[in-house]
Image: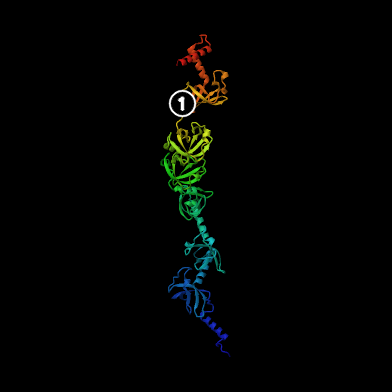
């Protein structure tokens, strides 16, 4: 009969297993179960644990701490351990602290999931599409979209921090758990919102965080509820874009300006918590005073100048330059340019200040007449020539005009004008300055004395002068007196008798005696009459040689007068 205990005998193996079951109990089932063990010593990276069996087990030290954290294990510590195998090839029991924690965690997580309760976890790693979270031994997946209510650029501050999560889905068979941090925040946010809205009133001052920035303002998180901070309510000064004063994530103190219970819309303000710079602005900026400011905005109708933060005035386009008319303000000033302005008007209730740019620079016509009084001589370039005269540059942006009548004493204006061309330098005398109409009158001929001045001073109305005929026209003749003064005798004044009033009977160069009827000193022109001279001579002859009652004829009287003159001439 074969020996049952012989090597290789099947019966011997079965007897050994039966003996083992008899010693330990056939239904102990240690493998796959959780047992309690005590750390008896530490060997390098392992902890040797006594679980009350025939041999001790070894557990890696890293399994005694959550992922990413340093394990804290000491001899004598007691832990629950998972038995992976009762005995390995070295005769040691294979234990796992991590699996024990996982089994325990899964049990607790399933209860929490069923009760829709939050669980605590530690975010410890990154994976594709999200992050890994340690839920007390069980590893869960946190999708990137479930980290926060709004996108988070840096999750560094969240790493390693214990915080609550909501389990969205779990499958123990596959070992999958999906959690959400966002769901917890939204629930908390809803609670805070309800509490905040319930006690919200206009005028309240709250702390908030800038959540988002748009072109028209910024949305501020008040702790569960958002409010709009419009760009015009950020500061008293002009702000073109909210990003000039705010950044996302910035802590701000705001005041509730308006709150609509129906729409739940909240309007916020920051400048309302600051002192209004417009209070007492009329005293700070009196009319006609000069100040320096910064150009903040340019429009088609003018430019806004900041006198101090929050206080702006408008320089209308008509008040920007003395000389540049119909020019866009952007060609006169630039944004952020520092300029000097004069206060023209202040309307404190309407928060308006009218400014003048040109007034602060000085009126160029006033400055010109101060530097160039009437009668002074200036020299300038001919900038333009028109049919009525020359425009001569007398300053950087102003011109004076020489009328064609002031070009020459002797040459006609149109003829004298033809002798000039644009770009020529000319000298002229200042004749008149009209500051209100912004006009400067110049004269070239006035640089020399008027050659007819002596004659004009000597000739009086009623004088008899000898003239030289210079032009014969249908309505009269033009004459010259002493070759310097022009006169004109109308057709009706050429003779006493109508039949002799014919211009064509006069020849150019002929000498004619005539009586002065009017002297126009400004035009340097005489009005003359031959008819008047003849009538006057006749009156004098009648008076001297006869009267109307003597019966003498006019011919007799004139004949006697002529003879008398001849006798007197012969005696001489």
Disc 1: which residue: 455
Seen from this angle, which residue lies furthest left? 283
Seen from this angle, which residue lies furthest bottom? 1
- Residue at 50 percent across and 75 percent down: it is 95
Report x, y in % for residue 440: 47, 35
Is 439 in front, or is 62?
A: 439
Above or below: residue 316 compared with residue 191: above
Q: Quadrant of the N terminus?
A: bottom right
Q: How many marks?
A: 1
Report x, y in % for residue 350: 47, 41
Above or below: residue 548 compared with residue 173: above
Is 460 in front, or is 218?
A: 460
Q: Quadrant of the C terminus?
A: top left
Above or below: residue 473 compared with residue 315: above
Q: Which structural element holds mark 1?
A: helix
Q: How is the image coloured?
A: rainbow
Report x, y in % for residue 338: 44, 46
Above or below: residue 394 compared with residue 515: below
Is 459 in front, or is 50?
A: 459
Query: Can the viewer see residue 289?
Result: yes
Query: Can the viewer see residue 354?
Result: no
Report x, y in % for residue 543: 48, 13
């Amino acid at each position: 009969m074969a020996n049952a205990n012989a090597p290789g005998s099947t019966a011997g193996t079965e007897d050994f297993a039966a003996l083992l079951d008899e010693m330990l109990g056939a239904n102990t089932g240690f493998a796959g179960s959780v047992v309690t063990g005590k750390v008896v010593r530490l060997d390098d990276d392992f902890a040797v644990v006594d679980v009350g069996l025939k041999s001790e087990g070894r557990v890696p030290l890293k399994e005694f701490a959550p992922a990413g954290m340093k394990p804290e294990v000491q001899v004598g510590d007691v832990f629950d351990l998972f038995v992976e195998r009762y005995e390995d090839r070295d005769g040691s029991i294979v234990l796992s602290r991590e699996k024990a924690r996982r089994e325990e965690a899964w049990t607790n997580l399933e209860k929490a999931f069923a009760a829709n309760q939050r669980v605590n976890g530690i975010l410890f790693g990154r994976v594709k599409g999200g992050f890994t979270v340690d839920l007390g031994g069980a590893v869960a997946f946190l999708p990137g979209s479930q980290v926060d209510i709004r996108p988070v650029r840096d999750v560094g501050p969240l790493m390693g921090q214990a915080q609550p999560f909501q389990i969205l889905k779990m499958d123990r068979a596959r070992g999958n758990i999906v959690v959400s941090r966002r769901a917890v925040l939204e629930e908390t946010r809803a609670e805070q919102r309800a509490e905040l809205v319930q006690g919200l009133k206009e005028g309240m001052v709250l702390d908030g965080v800038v959540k988002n920035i748009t072109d028209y303002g910024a949305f501020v998180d008040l702790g569960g509820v958002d409010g709009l901070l419009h760009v015009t309510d950020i500061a008293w000064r002009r702000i073109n874009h909210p990003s000039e004063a705010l950044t996302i994530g910035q802590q701000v103190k705001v005041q509730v300006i308006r709150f609509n219970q129906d729409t739940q819309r909240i309007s916020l303000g920051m400048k309302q918590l600051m002192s209004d710079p417009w209070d007492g602005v009329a005293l700070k900026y009196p009319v006609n005073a000069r100040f320096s400011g910064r150009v903040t905005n340019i429009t088609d109708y003018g430019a806004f100048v900041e006198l101090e933060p929050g206080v702006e005035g408008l320089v209308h386009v008509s008040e920007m330059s003395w000389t540049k008319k119909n020019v866009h303000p952007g060609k006169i000033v630039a944004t952020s340019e520092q300029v000097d302005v004069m206060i023209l008007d202040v309307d404190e209730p309407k928060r308006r200040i009218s400014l003048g740019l040109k007034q602060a620079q000085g009126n160029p016509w006033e400055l010109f007449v101060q530097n160039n009084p009437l009668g002074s001589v200036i020299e300038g370039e001919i900038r333009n020539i028109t049919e009525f005269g020359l425009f001569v540059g007398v300053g950087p942006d102003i011109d004076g005009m020489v009328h064609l009548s002031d070009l020459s004493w002797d040459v006609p204006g149109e003829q004298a004008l033809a002798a000039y061309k644009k770009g020529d330098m000319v000298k002229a005398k200042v004749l008149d300055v009209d500051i209100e109409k912004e006009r400067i009158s110049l004269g070239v001929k006035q640089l020399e004395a008027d050659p007819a001045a002596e004659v004009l001073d000597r000739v009086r109305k009623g004088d008899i002068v000898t003239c030289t005929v210079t032009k014969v026209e249908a309505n009269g003749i033009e004459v010259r007196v002493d070759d310097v003064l022009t006169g004109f005798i109308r057709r009706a004044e050429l003779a006493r008798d109508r039949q002799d009033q014919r211009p064509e009977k006069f020849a150019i160069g002929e000498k004619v005696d005539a009586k002065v009827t009017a002297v126009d000193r400004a035009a340097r022109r005489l009005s003359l009459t031959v008819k008047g001279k003849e009538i006057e001579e006749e009156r004098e002859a009648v008076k001297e040689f006869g009267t109307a009652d003597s019966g003498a004829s006019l011919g007799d009287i004139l004949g006697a007068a002529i003879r008398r003159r001849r006798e007197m001439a012969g005696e001489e």
